[in-house]
């Protein structure tokens, strides 16, 4: 297990290296950070452009640029944005903001997927199964931002009217400026109020599809011989389903969840846009792509790729925990 | 399949030619059905799948025949009827801020979205099939190289790749361009599915038999392996088509999708409508519901097909 983990980590580092190289190539070939100055009127003198190219390192060979970036990253320096501010310092607070949303969404989505999937399988072709199936299909078919707009329109308004005060917020990750003077409970309750809707909409994005996988896996397991054996030995139905069935039916879900984390990270870009969060998504779109800033895009990519790689590793380790027949090494 | 003779009687020496007593099928009361007939039959009896199919056909009729009936062009702007609510003066679903008929817009949007999906499938399907087939059939280093490539592209969230590419080609914000971009990056999961199918299928006896009879690799792939993995191929196509529509909508919402002056798609209508959710709700609800229905129906069809190909996932045999 230990050596397996080490080997997988090494392979992951390799994957990260190559994928960062590919994205670097893609961005370097097409991004021009000076673009916004070309259309300026009056157009800045040529010496200005030459100067900027020199400071941004655009005159260097492509491989030299990549090497400079890479050697910086190894020491924890993600380079500077086109405006000259260090990327590393900006990534961390933004990751915290997005992380609050994503971690909550993953936990909620997994729990809901398991509950709904198991109920759907155990009560197959009953009213509850059909209801859950219907909801899952609707959620899969809805565009996230449309669903989020519905949440903002009805849920936020409804809850706030119900309690007679502003409990849920529709934009931002905290009331602007609050963190400057407030702390502790006051700050975190405010953040919680901002957190609820984005987390729900992000969780809904993944939960529906995952619950379908969980239902299918559970159906497979319920029909297997060892379940019948367990029942024949006198275990209660509830106990067979939860102890024997669920444990085995969780294996496919771990794979799907691990693969889905990447999608979730991408989906967070949309959710952040809808709810005007100043997190990783906004950073990627407005600081990275709009500004033609390679370092920002690569910083974003690296964080998300690390998420994906780590979750895949965790999934592999979980297999061994869930199914003792699987021996890693 | 009828393989055994049920007739008893004196043993007749075998003579070449047609068996006496007419064709064998006459002797059985149950008609033998080919696998294809069984699959089609199962699909036709699948309530979920058929519901999806019917809704999908109705939507197609709405999108393609509707404009012929109403005769209204989405590009027509009427300054006298800006932002009118549904039901006003022939605007059945209302109009937008510059006086375009929303219903005509949705009809055009359905057409454009289907065009995008067709383009997406036409590009992604052959690519995924080719890569997956090569990796699964030849194995060894071909498999390693191709699958590591797929893994690599998978580390980057698809949406981000699409955004980066689309932002580099601002001229591509037409249905044509968006379809091509989606297609170029949408084949990764298909490649994995095809590979896993081929890995198990190539070990089957009939492949060995085909090899022994001197069939070429190309022939084995096209005549034996692809037909036998048809089920997952079709299911992938339907589900990926549904995903493509929502992806296009997401891309457009973020400002990297269909964006031309007289271009539209369901995604564009929806993302435009979101801005007007509280002031002009019809612009928000109708396109969203149209998109919901079309994606939903495609998903239901895909589910029906999956059940038809692989009935093992239900406790009752259909």
Image (cartoon, coloured by chain):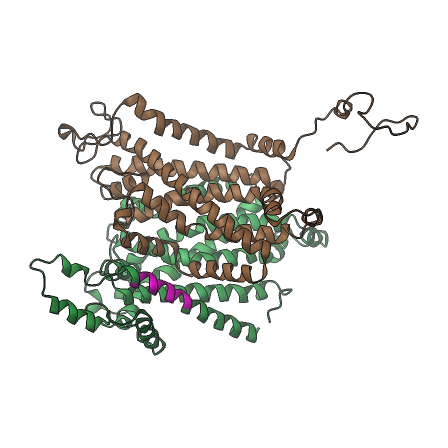
Chain colours: A green, B brown
Front-most of B127 and A256?
Answer: B127
Percent of width and height locating residue A328:
59, 69
The residue positioned 39% from the left and 54% from the top of the image is B158
Quarter of the image with the N terminus of chain B in it: top right
Which residue is at the far bottom?
A75
Look at the image and say whether residue A312 sits in the magenta stretch: no
| Depicted A304 relative to depicted B190: above or below | below
Front-most of B91 and A171?
Answer: B91
Left/right placement of residue A28 relative to residue A126 reads left
Quarter of the image with the C terminus of chain B in it: top right
Q: Quadrant of residue A142?
A: top left
Which residue is at the far left?
A42
Can residue A11 be seen in this snapshot?
yes
Percent of width and height locating residue A75:
34, 79
Front-most of B220 and B165?
Answer: B220
Front-most of B120 and A142?
Answer: B120
* Prevailing secondary structure class for the magenta stretch in the rendered image: helix
* Tally of numbered tags: 0
Left/right placement of residue A135 relative to residue A154 reads right
The residue positioned 26% from the left and 26% from the top of the image is B92
| Depicted B93 relative to depicted B181: above or below | above
Can residue A181 be seen in this snapshot?
no
Percent of width and height locating residue B289:
34, 36
Percent of width and height locating residue A157:
26, 46
Which stretch did the figure color magenta? A18-28
The residue positioned 24% from the left and 50% from the top of the image is A164
The residue positioned 35% from the left and 38% from the top of the image is B113
Q: Quadrant of residue A172?
A: bottom left
Left/right placement of residue A274 relative to residue A50 reads right
Q: Quadrant of residue A290?
A: bottom left
Which residue is at the far right?
B10
């Amino acid at each position: 297990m230990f050596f397996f983990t080490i080997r997988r980590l090494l392979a992951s580092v390799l994957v990260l290296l190559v994928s960062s190289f590919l994205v670097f190539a893609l961005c370097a070939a097409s991004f021009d950070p000076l673009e916004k100055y070309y259309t300026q009127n009056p157009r800045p003198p040529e010496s200005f452009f030459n100067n900027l190219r020199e400071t941004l390192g655009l005159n260097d060979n492509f491989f030299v640029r990549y090497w400079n970036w890479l050697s910086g990253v190894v020491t924890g320096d993600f380079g500077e944005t086109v405006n000259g501010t260090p990327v590393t310092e900006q990534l961390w607070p933004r990751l915290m903001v997005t992380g609050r949303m994503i971690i909550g969404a993953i936990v909620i989505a997994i729990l809901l997927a398991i509950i709904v999937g198991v109920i759907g399988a155990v009560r197959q072709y009953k009213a509850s199964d059909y209801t859950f199936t219907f909801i899952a299909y609707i959620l899969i078919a809805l565009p996230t931002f449309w669903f989020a707009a519905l949440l903002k329109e009805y849920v936020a308004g409804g809850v706030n009217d119900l309690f007679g005060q502003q409990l849920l917020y529709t934009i931002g990750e905290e009331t602007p400026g609050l963190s400057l003077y407030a702390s502790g409970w006051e700050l975190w309750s405010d953040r919680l109020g901002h957190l609820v809707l984005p987390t729900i909409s992000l969780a809904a994005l993944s939960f529906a599809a995952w619950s379908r996988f969980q239902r299918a896996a559970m159906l497979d397991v319920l029909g297997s011989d060892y379940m019948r054996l367990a029942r024949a030995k006198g275990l209660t139905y509830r106990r067979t389903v939860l102890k024997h069935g669920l444990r085995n039916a969780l294996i496919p879900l771990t794979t799907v969840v691990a693969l889905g984390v990447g999608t979730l990270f991408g989906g967070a870009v949309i959710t952040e846009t809808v709810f005007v969060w100043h997190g990783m998504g906004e950073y990627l779109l407005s600081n990275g792509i709009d500004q033609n800033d390679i370092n920002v895009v690569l910083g974003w990519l690296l964080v998300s790729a690390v998420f994906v790689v780590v979750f895949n590793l965790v999934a592999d380790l979980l297999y061994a925990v869930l199914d003792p027949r699987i021996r890693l090494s | 399949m009828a393989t055994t003779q049920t007739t008893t009687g004196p043993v007749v020496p075998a003579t070449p030619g047609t068996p006496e007593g007419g064709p064998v099928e006459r002797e059985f009361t149950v008609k033998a059905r080919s696998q294809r007939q069984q699959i089609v039959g199962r699909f036709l009896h699948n309530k979920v799948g058929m519901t999806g199919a019917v809704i999908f056909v109705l939507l197609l009729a709405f999108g393609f025949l509707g404009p012929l009936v109403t005769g209204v062009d989405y590009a027509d702007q009427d300054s006298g009827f800006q932002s009118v609510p549904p039901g006003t003066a022939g605007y059945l679903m209302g109009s937008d801020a510059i006086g375009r008929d929303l219903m005509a817009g949705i009809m055009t949007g359905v057409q454009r979205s289907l065009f995008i999906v067709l383009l997406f499938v036409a590009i992604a399907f052959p690519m995924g099939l080719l890569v997956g087939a090569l990796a699964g059939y030849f194995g060894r280093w071909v498999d390693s190289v191709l699958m590591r490539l797929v893994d690599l592209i998978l580390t980057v969230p698809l949406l981000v790749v699409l955004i980066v590419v689309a932002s580099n080609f601002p001229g591509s914000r037409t249905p044509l361009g968006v379809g091509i971009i989606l297609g170029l990056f949408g084949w990764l999961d298909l490649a994995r599915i095809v590979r896993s199918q081929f890995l198990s299928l190539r070990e089957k006896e009939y492949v060995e038999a085909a090899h022994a009879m001197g069939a070429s690799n190309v022939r084995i792939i096209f005549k034996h392996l692809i037909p036998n993995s048809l089920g997952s191929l079709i299911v992938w196509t339907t589900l990926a088509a549904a995903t493509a529509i929502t992806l296009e909508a997401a891309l457009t919402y973020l400002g990297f999708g269909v964006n031309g002056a007289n271009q539209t798609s369901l995604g564009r209508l929806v993302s435009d409508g979101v801005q007007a959710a509280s002031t002009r709700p019809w612009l928000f609800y109708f396109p969203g519901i149209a998109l919901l229905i079309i994606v939903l129906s495609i998903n239901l069809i895909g589910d029906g097909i999956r059940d038809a190909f692989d009935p093992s996932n239900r406790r009752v045999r259909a």
